Every structure is written in C-alpha cells, then in structure tokens.
Amino acid sequence: MSSKEVILTQNGLKKLEEELAYLKSVKRREVAARIKTAISFGDLSENAEYDNAKNEQAFIEGKIITLEKMLRNARLIEDDEVNRDVVGVGCTVKLQDLDGDEVMEFTIVGTAESDPANNRISNESPVGQAILGLPVGSEIEVKVPAGTIKYKILEIK
C-alpha cells in the first residue's frame, strides 16, 4: 500500500483502531498458541495444522502492517468541517433514481470505510465521484457496471 491519504470519519478511525488493537492483542496470541500446539505434534514437514497456523500468522501480520499504514496516513474529517451546501466526504445524501423513481440515502466516506451493504459509499466509487461537490437539485448520469443511472440530489445532511 502506498502512502496515499486515507480519509476517515471519527467512527471509521475508531473502528480501524479497534481492529488493529484486536489483531495485536488477541489474534496474535491465538495464532501463537496454535503454532505452539502444532509444533508439539512433531514432524513439521507434514504438519497441516502448523502450515495453516503459519499462513494465518502471515495474513494477520500483513493486515496489521496495512492498518498501521492507513492510520499513519489518515486524515480525519470532523463533523464541523463538513460543508452541507455541496456533497462531500462525511455527508449523507438522499438521491432519487430518475428512471426507477426509487429514493436512496448514502453516506459518502473514504475508501477504507466503504460498506455499500450499509449505504456507506466511497468518495472514489462511480456514484461518489459523480456527486462530489454538487448542490441539492443537481441531476447527474453515472456509468455503473449495469449501465447508466440518472440521479437527482434531493438532500444533503
């Protein structure tokens, strides 16, 4: 991972810090105990438990390094710096699908916090990029994998 700036809300920062603390304090110990147990089985050359535990250890260490880099390069978006006149990171936006008349609400977050299943979309996603900097009432067309969708910004909060 490069030293690209990672935009986070206060909630996103807290979640990353909690995940990092969990990996360092709990998961590392669990995997170390699994490795110790697997070693006690003898012959490491044909020891699947040992191989699996070592692979998990490598994954956890990689994830720890990634989270530490993200936190070092984090830029926190404070609630009071979010401009509600135009769409920006930290805003919750109500959009109307002009073709299907469906109304949906998304919170625009940095890539690290993106969770489309919970209506948290990245500022780098097609929809996120298309609406950034636009005021209420703006109509846009967004190219998505399924085609082109037309939206109208109904509300920014």
Image: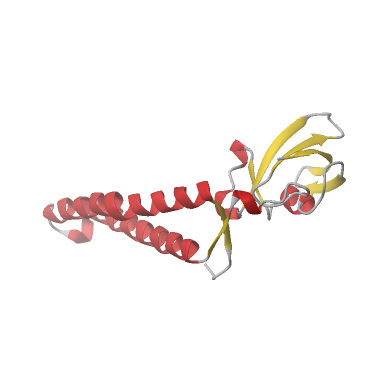
Residue 123's x, y, as percent?
A: 68, 53
Reply above or below: 67 against 119: below
Q: For this view, does 80 lie left or right of residue 96?
A: left
Front residue of 6/144: it is: 6
Residue 143's x, y, as percent?
A: 81, 49
Q: Quadrant of the C terminus?
A: top right
Residue 57's x, y, as percent?
A: 31, 57
Residue farthest front in this picture: 80
- Residue located at (21% from left, 61% from top): 45
- Residue located at (64% from left, 38% from top): 119
Residue 48 in view (yes/no): no
Colour mode of the rendering: secondary structure
- Residue located at (75% from left, 48% from top): 127
Front residue of 147/22: it is: 22
Q: For this view, does 23 lie left or right of residue 92?
A: left
Residue 118, quarter of picture = top right
Front residue of 60/112: it is: 112
Residue 100's x, y, as percent?
A: 83, 30
Residue 99 in view (yes/no): yes
Q: For this view, does 137 lie left or right of residue 25?
A: right
- Residue located at (42% from left, 53% from top): 17
Q: For this view, does 52 lie left or right of residue 155?
A: left
